[in-house]
Image (cartoon, rainbow, N blue to C red):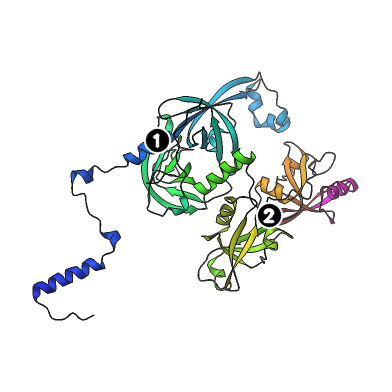
Amino acid sequence: MTIPSLHPVRALLFAFCMVLLAVPAAWAQQVPQSSEQIKLSFAPVAKRAMPAVVNIYTRKVVRTAQPLSPLFNDPFFRHFFGDRMPMGIPEDRIQRSLGSGVIVNGDGLVVTNHHVVAGSDEITVVLSDRREFEAQLVGSDERTDLAVLRINTRGETLPVLPIGDSDQLEVGDLVLAIGNPFGVGQTVTSGIVSAVARTSIGVGDFRSFIQTDAAINPGNSGGALVDMNGNLVGINTAIYTRNGGSNGIGFAIPTPMVKAVIAGITEDGKVVRPWLGATGQDITSEMVSALDLKRPMGVLINGLYPGGPAEKAGMQVGDVVVAVNGREISDPESLRFRLATLPVGEDAALTVLRQGRERVLQVKLVAPPDNPPRDMTEIKGRNPFSGTVVANLNPALAEELGLQTIEQGVIITRIARGTVAARLQFRPGDIILRINDAPVNTVADLRRALSTARDAWKITMRREGEVFSLTVGG
């Protein structure tokens, strides 16, 4: 661009104006210019939100018994006695814990973390104005680490924290964390959204967390993550720490999951999640060109359950799922999260890429079927599986066990300590494939195979996707 000859003063003004036009609006920030600006604070947001955030105190009676003699603590004795160790007189002790919660309904509905109230005999909710209420557990969902409580408000209407849309959060947005860290009392800390849709955090089975650097410490669990509009955008659930305190890395459960769990527990008494009937894997950089993608994104479908919702919708092995109802999918965990926030009975629009072309599949969201019948059976007698509980694996059971599989067959669900199966190091989740070259498709097949084999068993099993064999006896 050529600038025409101008008077020196005019040229300077022209250049200055061009610089102003080139500066983005987001850069037009400055230090406070007055005492009024210096006094700006988060106080109005905190003042609106704090009355709806509560402290939760729990009490649990734990029965313990000490060995009659210190000798019984020796590993030598435990090797022979196992679970049959002679014990002393049982003693009861009181175990107490604390956490936080959020009032989401004026008639006394409170949401918190599952781990805050799990196994509690008594739950006490304390409001910010120090009023105390006894609370009842309405329902709990361990897999998302969420629980719903109800308190008797005695006819009073309690303050409520409106539930916002955490999908609108962006990295860099200001947030407040409100809770009861270390039991010191209600505390407000501030920070920013450090990341969204964190799926690599090993907390719960449905992972898509909001990461924040607002100080979160033990006792904050179940408390509120609040945006600058005073809306709830997450339930604080975990921290990354090396010393038990805050290191500036905290995680919150996003509100789409919070709303789904509240609705499931209050309407149906439990959380029922949609079943896709498909399995998938991450897209690596090496797979991008082969799949005709521009970058690693989405989930590559590698298995379909016969007659499942995905297959009925027209999905094929090799499809790449990139969005659910317009929300981008980055990996299998984010796909599971998005589906888990949707209600059973509705349709979901899954955007897939097939041979480089985009198409939208309408998938009917259904509950995982409890078919074929489980036929839960405890195996006894002189055989390698003595001490196990086995069942026919079906989608409903796989969902309950937290298994990402579309397999069918016979699965070990439980193993008693000190039994033959325990000594052979079988594990819950192992799928029995064959015994002495006879296929095992049902529990009836397993019982038949065990009754015909006498002295030797050649067992083929699948564990975490890997097939292995072992021979017992003979």
Which amino acid type is marked by label 1?
Met
Please state if 20 lies on the left or on the right of 461 as rendered.
left
Identify the element where label 1 is drawn.
helix
Q: Where is residue 473 in the image (x, y as percent from the top left)?
A: 83, 47
Disc assigned to residue 405: 2
Residue found at x 59% / y 44%:
143
Q: Position of residue 159 (x, y in %)?
A: 44, 34
Q: Position of residue 215 (x, y in %)?
A: 39, 41
Q: Which of 5 and 191 is in front in this view?
A: 5
Query: On the picture, is 227 further left or further right than 70?
Result: left
Q: Which residue is drawn at 36% across and 43% down?
A: 190
Is 207 situated left or right of 90 in this image?
A: left
- Image height of 106 relative to 303, above or below: above
Distance between the alpha carbons at the discs numbered 2 and 1: 43 Å
- Pointer 1 residue: 50
Residue closest to the eye, 34 or 196: 34
Q: Which of marks 2 and 1 is nearer the N terminus?
A: 1
Numbered disc in front, either 2 or 1: 1
The answer to whether 400 is drawn above or below residue 22 in the figure is above
Residue span colored magenta: 436-459
Q: Which residue is drawn at 62% across and 60% down?
A: 280
Q: Crowding at label 1, few (<14), some or many (≥20) Cα neighbours within 10 Å?
A: many
Residue 75 visible within the image: yes
Residue 456 highlighted magenta (yes or no): yes
* Badge 2 amino acid: Thr
Q: Quick one: which residue is furthest to the top in this view? A: 89
Write the residue at 41% across / 41% down.
177
